[in-house]
Amino acid sequence: MKEREPIIEELHTDSVWSKLVRILNISENYDPWRIALRISLIYLLLGVIWILLSDKIVEWFVRNKQMIVVISMIKGWFYVGITASLIFFLIYSVLRRIKVIEKELRGKNEELSAIYEELVASEEELRWQLDEILNHQEKLKTSEERFRLALQGSNDLIWDIDFISHQHYFSERWGDFLGYGSEEFPKSFEDLANFLHPDDIQPLEKATNDYFEGKSSFYSCEHRLLTKDGIYKWFYSRGKALRDASGKIIRFAGSLSDITETKENALKLQNSYEELEATYEELYGTQEELTRQNMALHDYQKSLHQMAYYDHLTGLPNRLHLYENLTHQLKNFPDRQKALLFIDLDNFKFINDTLGHAVGDELISNIGSRLKNLLITEHIISRLGGDEFIICLYQYTDLDDVQEASKKIIQCLDQPFKIRNSTLHVTMSIGIALYPQHGTTSDELLKNADIAMYKAKARGKNRYVVYDNEMNASIKERMLIEENLRTALSHDEFRVYYQPQVDTKTQQICGFEALIRWQNKDLGVVPPLKFIPIAEETHLIIPIGHWVLKQACSFLKTLYDQGFSALTMSVNISMLQLVQEDFIESVMSILQLTGLPPHYLELEITESILMESYEAISLKLHQLRLAGIQIALDDFGQGYSSLSYLKRYLKRLPINTLKIDKLFIDNIGLSAAENELADVIVMIGRRMGLTVLAEGVETKEQLDYLKHHQCDKIQGYYFSEALPEEEAVALLQKR
């Protein structure tokens, strides 16, 4: 409060004080004593004049005493009237003046009241202004502290020039930058010239003058300064000037940044650019060529964007585009239902391996076009990579809509693809994940859709499956199987079991089928139906199949050495093995290594392999047959069996044995129609001159029926399950 007193006393400004003095002057002019004295003197003067002169005048003119008395009386009354009038006039004029003054005083009183209120308001405003000044002083103090801290922590040198006080300031970074002590700092802006590189003095002066003359919005200049070590460093100087009301510069401040490293790099780049420019001009020479190159660069940038966000083979959005688009949809439209369809082509690796990657790429491109034409604009299709596609359904009503869309997508591949000289039948498996039920992020939806897709493949392929939480367990099991499968061969965890094949006429064992078994220390006994598909997907089936073939041939050669003749060994061959370029050489080397004659070996291929890759495998099958190796068609009747199929393929392939699928054997005895199916298959095989073998014989009724219809061989639990080597030998010895 004491700080405010001097400011409040300043309320008595010249204008207000003059009003008060003017009012006080009025009160000083109004003096009652002087007015009363004035009236008394006037009355006294008139009385004296009247007394002294009136009698003299009467005596001059009137000699009659009686007349004089009368005149004196009249004179007395006249004097009374005159003096009464004079007194009335004087008192009236005084009272009138008093009334005027009183009225004027009342006006002045109101004016004083207004002035007082003005003084009170001025005091309040001054108090508010004082608070503002104190607040500004506090903020200024805080700002100064902040500026001091920023100055200390800044990597730049701060300079400041006051043109009024002629004071110059350079921050302590001057010493850090140039190595000088504080006593060696420049004392003025002109002293800076002693540190400047001679070539930079004129450019710095020009930059300064241009800014001072208003040719640039701020001052900036690059120049070199001499360090105490005698070398020059590059600095970037930038500043602003403060001008007064007349436009005269009163202060100039800014910063210096060390750009030595940047400048050196820029100079190197400049030199490189000059060399490149010279080369560029030498190569192209003309402005038209430069323009063409710029256009080419623009096109290249567009192609880079295309390459970054779109698949080069199909032109569809790629994985990166999918993630960005799906993330955008999830973030900006969280209330909308969304569905993610994970598409994977069935057995595409077989096509790639048998017909080549060029055919595979063309097939992928055609499938992408067919899928794209199928979808509406609200849905997005992307190629994830390989034979995997992702379809995002961003608008649908319920699950029925998603399932209906999935059916249409699967049906769009019903028509085969004609690529080069091949007609390709392709199917797909689809996994479906729904937002938000199955995930709220892109990664979660993709992962769960992928899991559902694998479940679709496990259920027979060419179908769609909607994700549910229970699938996680099966996927974890699959991953665990794959992880252990990769080391199973090196850890000697596989064993080959042998299931006898029996001649129906002699009731004697005429051969074996080699069947792989796997026992893992962590997983225990893993069924072939679980690990064989995984081995094919990971291509581990190639070394595993090679190992099984070698073990089976070695075992059969051992049996022959022990005197068990006229036996054959059937070994299942995967499509991936068959399409290997060195497959035939690999088989022949195993036969040579084990010493087993080729005609005792029978290689089994499935009906599905025959249909999917006929062009690729037919030549190899003929070569194997020419080498003396027998060929069996396994699982006959399970997939594509038809009269046109038999006519087209069976008569043209060097097949020795037709193996009836267990499905038909299981149905024997259930109905006359089921029995006739098995009968027809046996009849077809015999009429084509093939050896017919029935798999999965488990009852005497099935055996008797097959013998009656002249089935050549049988295999199944009715005679024996698959046996390890020792038990198989013991069974031979027993029979």
Image (cartoon, rainbow, N blue to C red):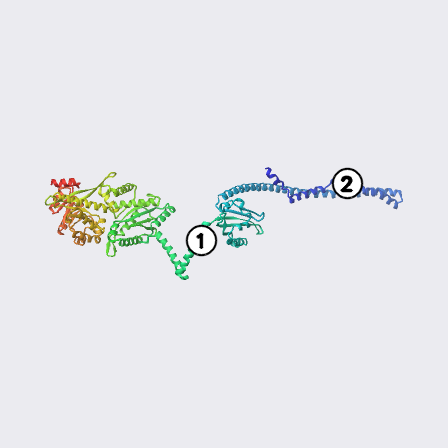
Residue 56, x across and y down, in percent:
87, 44
Please state which of residues 255 and 664 is positioned toward the viewer in this rendering: 255
The quarter of the rendered structure image containing the C terminus is top left
Whole-number angstrom distance, CA of label 1 to CA of label 2: 106 Å
The quarter of the rendered structure image containing the N terminus is top right
User: Where is mark 2, residue-wise?
Assistant: 37
Q: Amino acid at mark 1?
A: Leu
Q: Which mark is residue 267?
A: 1
**CB atoms of marks 1 and 2 within 8 Å:** no
Q: Amino acid at mark 2?
A: Leu
Q: Nearer the viewer, mark 1 or mark 2?
A: 1
Q: Secondary structure at mark 2?
A: helix
Inspect this view and state whether residue 82 appears.
Answer: yes
Vertical placement of 469 versus 349: above or below?
above
Please state which of residues 76 and 401 is positioned toward the viewer in this rendering: 401
Q: Which mark is residue 674?
A: none
Horizontal placement of 697 versus 243: left or right?
left
Residue 544, x across and y down, in percent:
22, 45
Residue 137, x across and y down, in percent:
55, 41
